[in-house]
Amino acid sequence: MQPSVFAEAVKIWKNNFSKEISVDELKFELDLHKKLLNFFQVGDFYYFIMNLSTVSFDLVSTSITSVLGYDPAEVDLYFLFNCIHPEDQIWYTNFENENVNFLLNLPKEKIPKYKVRMDFRMRKKNGEYIRLMHQSIAIQQYEDGGIFRTLCVHTDITHLKSFGKPVLSYIGLDGEPSYIDVKIGKPLLTIATPLTRREKEILLLMIDGKQNKEIADLLFISKQTVDRHRKNMITKNNFKNSGELIAVAIKNGWI
């Protein structure tokens, strides 16, 4: 992980949410079970409560062990951020910046009526990557409407989405409109991957079951060019065959 990416994410939270507040000033109304019902679960999940004033976790559920393999005691914000795939850390940071712009421009009474939803790849303790759906919702606010605590749920959706770019959406509750696949600016940083852009295009079509001639026609290149790219992907990464290439690429989040 590039430390500057995490630092940028922390800066977003601290600049927009960090305030001094005493317990007596809080109007903390948290019904965890009711809030969890607002999240439609499609796989194994864990949840945590994030304190935006201290930029830390107040609670991490024990179910994180069954999903990622980590003990809740060893998980803090930096640790969990470091588990996000390096390419997706950039997407996540850009998404958080977009979230600030969206949520803090809402009337304060509407902020708890929106659920932020995004997806990214997360590394398990055994080194494998899975695709998680991140959902978060404000559960405590300051008098002026600023967000103090959020409830976040991470659900394993690898069986639904094994590859593809992360997507950001805002899901309206209690009759509020939803905004799906919200567009953001360009990534903050560029991170090198084992595959070139063209190799990724070819590999995605290979995963889709296309033969080299079909791939060539779809990409408007020669079959010889596809043959060469396919061979290069296998040899430069020391794979035995295309099956191993595809398996490792999906497992390690190369696509």
Image (cartoon, rainbow, N blue to C red):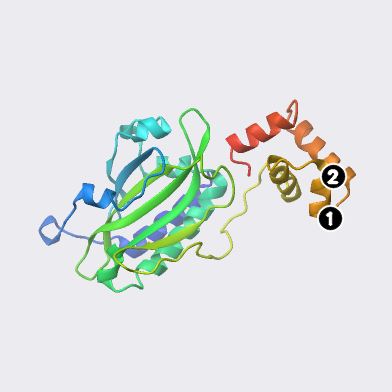
Neighbor class of circle 1 (other Cα within 10 Å; few <14, some 14-19, many 20+) is few
Question: Callout 1, which amino acid?
Answer: Phe
Which residue, as the protein is rendered here, is positioned at the far left? Answer: 24
- Disc 2 is placed on an element classified as helix
**Location of residue 238 by image quarter:** top right
Q: Quadrant of the C terminus?
A: top right
Residue in the image at 79% along x and 41% along y: 211
| Residue 198 coordinates in the image, percent (x, y) | 76, 49
Residue in the image at 79% along x and 53% along y: 218
| Above or below 211: residue 144 | below
- Name the foreground residue: 10 vs 214: 214
Left or right: where 117 falls relative to 185: left
Left or right: where 11 falls relative to 232: left
The residue pinned by badge 1 equals 220
| Residue 42 coordinates in the image, percent (x, y) | 41, 43
Q: Earlier in the sequence, mark 1 or mark 2?
A: 2
Left or right: where 127 falls relative to 9: right
- Disc 1 is placed on an element classified as loop
Question: Callout 2, which amino acid?
Answer: Lys
Residue in the image at 40% along x and 54% along y: 10
The residue pinned by badge 2 equals 213
